[in-house]
Image: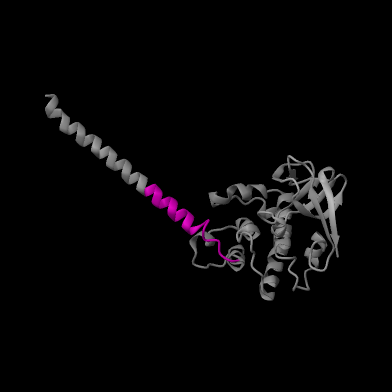
């Protein structure tokens, strides 16, 4: 009896093993498709401006982005070498960033549709966060230097650290690093290493509003607040 039952048991086990193998192949394929169509398909600033304005491009991943997700991708998708925008693209970006400030109360209520960037999106779903996001994009693209009619953006962000404006450079003077916060004494966004150079955008109380741009070694152009006690002046350029 044992010998008669053995082949049936073996067949049952072989079926399970085959089923597991098929599932593994399926998930590996899905994983590959996910990253080949999203994280690795960064696109251009024009692509994300299309996504913000809900203009279909034929790329399913980008075409399903909501405006808040599109802004997040505009902030840092291109890595260390953001594209130089044409005059037309700068004008278009000016309109998009101005629109984002005007309807920030709508944007902060948008949830991430794409879980790959949900943590970044969550960071900006508050009034200060969305303001910081828009300013980060503005400064990432050098304050859109070829656009003359950007009074609304200049009124909000000033011209310090923009082409032609004052540049105040300071460095982190703390062996354990300096905490970059979303708001003064608020949530920590990231920690900048000792001796990291930042540009100071404004000062208020005991806090400096700074930007850690890619040109200074940052992984992405990010605006935040650092306590002045751990900052040391390094240079003031005109």
Tell which of 141 and 62 is nearer to you.
141
Residue 10: percent from left, percent from top? 20, 34
Q: Residue 72's image quarter?
A: bottom right
Residue occupying the far right of the picture: 205
Question: How far across and down, in percent of the image, does residue 111 sit?
Answer: 60, 50
Q: Kindly give the residue lying farthest to the top in the view shown.
A: 1
| Residue 16 location, quadrant | top left
- State the quadrant of the C terminus: bottom right
**Is residue 100 rendered to the left or right of residue 6?**
right
Above or below, 209 relative to 43: above
Residue at 78 percent across and 72 percent down: it is 149
Q: Which residue is most to the bottom?
A: 87
Stretch in magenta? 26-44
Q: Residue at x 80, y 60 (%)?
A: 156
The answer to whether residue 42 is magenta is: yes
For residue 16, side relative to residue 31 (left or right): left
Q: Nearer the viewer, residue 176 or 88?
A: 176
Q: Residue at x 72, y 62 (%)?
A: 138
Answer yes or no: is residue 67 visible. no
Q: Is residue 222 above or below residue 9?
A: below
């Amino acid at each position: 009896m044992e010998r008669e039952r053995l082949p049936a048991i073996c067949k049952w086990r072989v079926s399970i093993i085959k089923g597991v193998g098929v599932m593994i192949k399926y998930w590996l394929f899905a994983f590959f498709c996910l990253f080949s169509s999203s994280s690795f398909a960064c696109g251009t600033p024009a692509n994300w401006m299309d996504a913000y304005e809900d203009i279909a491009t034929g790329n399913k991943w980008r075409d399903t982005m909501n405006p808040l997700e599109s802004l997040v991708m505009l902030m840092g998708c291109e890595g260390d070498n953001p594209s130089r925008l044409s005059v037309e693209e700068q004008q278009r970006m000016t309109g998009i960033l101005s629109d984002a400030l005007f309807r920030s109360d709508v944007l902060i209520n948008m949830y991430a549709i794409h879980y790959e960037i949900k943590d970044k999106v969550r960071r900006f779903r508050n009034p200060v966060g969305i303001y910081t996001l828009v300013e980060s994009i503005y400064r990432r693209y050098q304050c859109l230097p070829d656009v003359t009619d950007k009074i609304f953006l200049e009124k909000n962000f000033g011209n310090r650290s923009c082409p032609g404006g004052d540049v105040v450079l300071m460095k982190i003077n703390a062996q354990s690093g300096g905490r970059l916060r979303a708001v003064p004494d608020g949530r920590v966004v990231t920690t900048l290493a000792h001796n990291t150079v930042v540009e100071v955008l404004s000062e208020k109380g005991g806090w400096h509003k700074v930007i850690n741009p890619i040109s200074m070694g940052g992984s992405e152009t990010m605006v935040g607040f650092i306590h002045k006690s751990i900052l040391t002046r390094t240079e003031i350029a005109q």
